[in-house]
Each structure stands twice: as structure tokens, then as C-alpha cells.
Amino acid sequence: MNGATRTRLEATLAALDPKARRRLSQRAATLQREARAEVRAQRRKGFRRAGPQPDDALHEWMLWALLQDGAGEPAEAPAEDDEAAAHEDERQGVVLSAARGAAEVLVGEETILAAIAPRLLAEQATLIAVGDEVTLVRRAEDRWELQRVAPRRSRLSRPDPQDPLKERVIAANVDRVVAVVAATTPPLRVGLLDRLLVAARRGGVALTVVVNKLDLADAARRVELDELLAPYEALQVAVHRVSASTGEGLDALRRSLGGALCVLVGASGVGKSSLLNALEPTLAAQTGEVSEAVGKGRHTTTRSTLYRLADGGRIIDTPGVRAFGLWRVGLDELNEAFPDVAELAPDCRYGDCRHLDEGEADCGVRRAAAEGRLSAPRLLGYQRIARSLLAEQG
């Protein structure tokens, strides 16, 4: 089959609900068994039948079964009158928020609550995200259905917490990932910043770091923060030190964000919602306090939501994260987020050096860290992620 046909078949397969997918899988297995019997009956070495071969993956047989049903054929062009009528009942918008089975979509200046088409529900977490550009179709006078999702320009994603083999898209079509950390409590975790930097670069998005609650940091803590953040600033990552309470640094942050679509990500309690309210006081984003008992913030945002700012910017607020997994990142992509590590790799004795357990005599990266030419936290950050990626690969 040609590439266009395969693309249509893959899209059809992805949209099937679990029950239909099981039926298709059973049918594909039957077709595969019949093909094996056909090959055996021929008793000719190297005999190849039309379509998938008996030893091909079941996935290929599922696509073949769909093709037999005509799923790979391009849709017939509608008549001019039908097309005009269809456009009257279609509207394009941007997803503001999505819950199971429905989405709030901004269409012009109007917010529409639309049901999600049944064929999209099975893969909703992957196919529909805040920031997606979508097409709504009118199903009744006051009832709209989300039918299509436009290709994404960028994304921030992670493995689905319920199924690590699936991708969970947190935000789509964003220009900037804004990693929000607290100056004091909860403690700044550079490991989370490292992972967000990797995920942002993989998704085609720039990273900005915002240190909130600066008013709570004394002079000694501010020096510590400068040392922790210096490696990121050396990588041309924008770092802003602000206080949502006093307004310190907010004007510079506003100018930096401009009219971009940004997604706020950070641990609970760092003040994402408070920061959002400080940037746009007219918003009613809920805020919460940090629990002194455990030093962690309470979750005040329960799902990702897109807010519009008066200056034309748009910000997606997300629930607090305790950990951030990486979706299908290889060591090559890890190197792109750690150019300070990668540029030292030519000094390693072996070309496949992973900079993990090799001795300093053989590993130029570890030797540079020992000599102070590479930040020790940066090397540790690289090693933590590299070990987790290697463990996932088995």
C-alpha cells in the first residue's frame, strides 16, 4: 500500500474504540492463519501471496483488514451544495480544556462546550490536548461535536501515567514551556528542570525558567539559586526571578512572554496559579497554600486550562507534577538538551562512551567534571536521565 493509504489506515485504527479494536484484531488473526494455510498448501519455497505475509506483525494484518473494508480509500468529494452546507455547520477553534468525553473550545470570542466524537474517545489523551486547533460540527441546534484535530506544530508530552506505552500530550502548539520553581519551598529540583528541558526540545518548544516567591529568599539563598541556575543560563535558557506577591520581576517576564502561547509546568506549591493571577489579575485561577506539614503544595489545578491575557498572550496552567517522565527519548536527543556534556564527548577514549561508569581516564566528560570544567550537577542530571532511559530499553 502507498504512504497516503497507510496514513489513512493508521488514523482509522487509532480512532477505534477498544471493543471494535478487539473485533478487528480477532479478524486479522483469522486472516493471518488462513494465509499461513495458503502458503503451506502451495508447497513452493519462497511463495509470496498478495498483501501481508504470514510472519508479518498482527498490526499489519489489522491494517489489511481495514483496507478490505475500504477504509484506505480517500473520501469522496462532496457536491458543491453539500460542501457549502457543511461549512455553515462547521467551526474552527482552539481547545481551552478537555475532560472525558467533552472539550471547551474557543471559537472567536465564544466558548463552546463540544462533545468529542466517539471515534476519538478511545485515544482522547493522545489525540486531543489543550492548545489543539480543532473543527467542530453542529449535530443539533445547540449541540456541537469535536470531529477533527489539525496537525500540531509543537507539543509537550510525557508517558501516560495509566499506560506508559501511550503518549499523554499535555499541551499542543505551544511556543514556550515555562518551568515554575519556588525560591525556597518546595525545594528547587534541578532534575525536573533537566527533564523539562529535554521534553521541550524534543517537542520543538523553547524553555523558560521562572523562580517564584523570590521575596521569601534571603541573600544567601539568592546566591545559591544563582549557582544552581547558571548552567541553564549558559545554555541560553531564559531565567526570570519574580515574586507573584510583591510584583518583583513581573514586568520583565510579561515582556519576555509577549503574545506567545505558553504552558506553565511545575511542582505543586510553587505558585503557578498565583503567578498567573499576578500576570492577569482579571483571571479567577484558583490558588492554594503550601502545606507546612509536608512541605508540598496542595493541588489547586486539576486539569490543564488555557487562559487568555489582556496583552494577547495565552497561558496554559497545568496540574502540579511530582515527577516528569520522558516520551520516547533516545540518548541522541538527550545529548541535544545537554550540549555542554556532548561537546566534551570527543575527549572520551571510546566513541560509544555513555559517561556513566567509565573511569575518568577513559571518559573525558567525567574527567572534565572532576577538574571543574563541567558543572557536577549537570553531569549528575545527565547520568540520572541516561540511566532511566537505558533501564526502559531493557
Image (tube, helix red, strand yellow):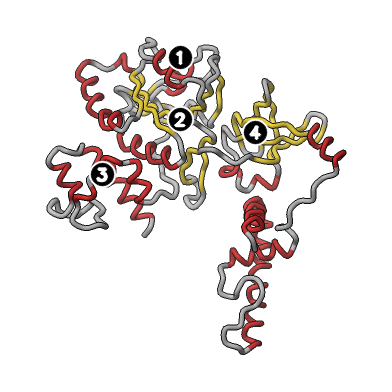
Q: Which residue is mark 3?
A: 343
Q: Which residue is mark 1?
A: 278
Image position, residue 299 (x, y; %): 46, 28
Query: Element type at marker 3?
Result: loop
Of the residues under marks 3 and 1, which one precedes in the sequence? 1
Give the CA separation, mark 4 to mark 1: 27 Å
Q: Amino acid at mark 3?
A: Glu
Q: Between label 2 and label 1, give the one nearer the viewer.
A: 2
In the picture, the disc for residue 103 is 4
User: Do tag 2 and tag 1 residues touch (Cβ < 8 Å)?
Assistant: no
Image position, residue 251 (x, y; %): 41, 13
Give the CA separation, mark 4 to mark 2: 23 Å
Q: Between label 4 and label 2, give the one nearer the viewer.
A: 2
Q: Which residue is mark 2?
A: 176
Of the residues under marks 4 and 2, which one precedes in the sequence? 4
Image position, residue 12 (x, y; %): 67, 53
Q: Amino acid at mark 1?
A: Ala
**Going 66% across and 30% down the picture, which residue do you hit?**
93
Q: How many marks?
A: 4
**Going 48% across and 20% down the picture, which residue do you hit?**
258
Query: Element type at marker 2?
Result: strand
Q: Amino acid at mark 4?
A: Ala
Give the CA separation, mark 3 to mark 2: 25 Å
For label 1, the crowd category at 10 Å Cα-Cα, with few meaning under 14, some 14 to 19 and many 20 or more, is some
